[in-house]
Image: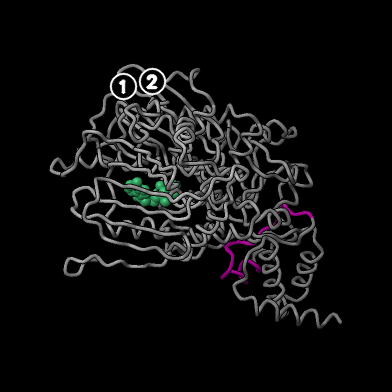
Amino acid sequence: MTRKGRAVTETLEFQAETRQLMQLMIHSIYSNKDIFLRELISNASDALDKLRIESLVDSDLDVDRSDLHVELASDRDARTLTVRDNGIGMTRDEVVSLIGTIAKSGTAEMLRRLRETEQSAELIGQFGVGFYSAFMVADRVTLVTRKAGEATGTRWESTGEGTYTIDEVDDAGQGTTVTLELKPADDDDQLYDYSDPAVLRSIVKKYSDFIAWPIRLAGAEEPVNSMKALWARPRSEVTDEEYNEFYKHVAHDWTDPLEVVHMKAEGSFEYEALLFVPARAPFDLFTRDAPRGVQLYVKRVFIMADAEALIPRYLRFVKGVVDAADLSLNVSREILQQDRQIQAVRRRLVKKVLGTLRELSPEKYQTFWAEFGRAFKEGLIEDPANRDAILDLLSFSSTAEEEKLTTLREYADRRPEGQTEIYYLTGDSRATIENSPHLEAFRAKGYEVLILTDPIDEVWVDQVTEYDGIPLKSVAKGAVDLGSEPVEPGAFGTLLSWMTETLAESVKEVRLSSRLVTSPACVVGDADDLTPTLEKMYRAMGQPLPPIKRILELNPEHPLVVGLRDAYGKDADDPTLPETAELLYGMALLAEGGELADPARFSRLLAERLAKTL
Ligand SMILES: Nc1ncnc2c1ncn2[C@@H]1O[C@H](COP(=O)(O)OP(=O)(O)OP(=O)(O)O)[C@@H](O)[C@H]1O
């Protein structure tokens, strides 16, 4: 802030979450401190990319593009290290919002989980604390920056303990300079001497070799990094370690990827792609604005991050780079979305990723499924063209074995003779589903039922009707045909029509069931009815829906049902009978984990009945 030409230093407080994250950093949950340099260089490289793009878009922007680079300067006596770039820089407000706070959604949730678990290092890795990692090796960090096109710069300084200061600087150069006052080296603590050029050189080689901008040690002409685009090199010449480091750079992740997809397409539209399946889901995988897409390059030049046109939403966890030979450097997101060639690239990439997932070792597949399965299932709705391939990659809990998941193929192959359908039941939890009366006859027959508990399951089962020619069928919907004699109303006819009338406000029909063995009743839907969970979801989203009535099915073998029939036959006007019908319906709802419309009334009726038995 400047008043009458004099710069005033402002002291500001870190946001509470930022403070907590920084404390975690400083008290070093990472054993490997070297990576602070990778983070600072990564930021510098991003800033150079941004400057290049900005100056393409705005040709009047007053910047020097002649020698874009990153410089590392150290002073062994003063024990300082400076990381400088002549990139895009930041305005004062950006410094405050980008460096002083962590604006990412989900921060609070993330910190809660950090506090609750032992694996803070791994969790914090998902979050990426980039710039703050400087405090692992420095007692004080000073950042001087000037936004491209602006005259004055900003100085930010902090010891990482609660507050930072902000100043105005008149003579700031182009870009950003980060100066670290280094902590004393302590080899035992993997805190090396980062003022030693040899140490810096080896860290750059190890973690940042592929960075596309020259990284130079002060005073030297030659860049330390080779600047070779990793994706342009043949697969056989790239080491796993190089892939891993590159992945961490593009994905802002701290863990090694699960799998690498490296491909080159020749022909009318040439491109190279280097994609990664991460080993861990980011904490914001399911937030609405979760970043999605891969980086787009054109002939080795970075064009944009998160090019969503290249990867469908259900594969949003895939990270990496696509480098296309024949696109304009000015290509926009809108143009990409409509470009037929880009659509063809996307189809190819999807096929390649699905193929890679299919080839994963069982251990890796398990990791993939545990981390990304829920997001991946969205593909059943989003990408009907690849539905079969997606179905083949799904895993399900089932009634067959508690611990083990099953694929549809395995399920289909295990089916006993006579079972012509694949059965499933959706619900909130394994426990409610397992105890649901709908399963009884399937159990008795030895038929396995898939247990679907993710909200997305409710949605896709509506659209996917078969797997490999075998119909998929909900055990809670429609009529079931388990090969037994069809149930005829027979002696129950009058009871059923009376109950249908009595419960007309709640159900559309009362009929006999062929799926019950031990329970007296259950509630089922018609084949094309919404399930109660889906109905609740739609209503929560504000969708107007007419009331949805389901069907009450009675077990003609159950003493309660038989007793009710006989009582009705004896005295159809008995005033307690409608209440019995209501109780029966309530019990059926409770048994499937459903909600009663009027729980207080239900429990009063039940209490009255119980009192009579004492
Ligand atoms: N050298 C720099 N030049 C310009 N802007 C920078 C620079 N360093 C950091 N920033 C800005 O500050 C933001 C926060 O940086 P930080 O390293 O904390 O996180 P990040 O790079 O966004 O992501 P991650 O935490 O995953 O590394 C960056 O996104 C960028 O906008």
Foreground of the two, 159 or 498: 159
Left or right of 408 on screen, residue 228: left
Which quadrant: the C terminus?
A: bottom right
Figure check: 231 above or below 280: above
Q: Residues within 10 Å of mark 1 (few under 14, many from 20)?
A: some
Percent position (x, y) of residue 219?
A: 33, 33
- Residue at image position (65%, 69%) is 498
Task: Inspect this view and state whether residue 461 appears.
Answer: no
Percent position (x, y) of residue 529?
A: 53, 54
Which quadrant: the N terminus?
A: bottom left
Residue bearing the label numbered 1 = 269
Residue bearing the label numbered 2 = 265
Would the CB of label 1 be found within 8 Å of ligand 1? no
* Mark 1 residue type: Phe
Figure check: 233 above or below 444: above
Element under label 1?
loop
Residue 431: image tag? none
- Over which residues does the magenta segment extend? 498-517
Tell me if label 1 and label 2 are in contact, CB under 8 Å: yes
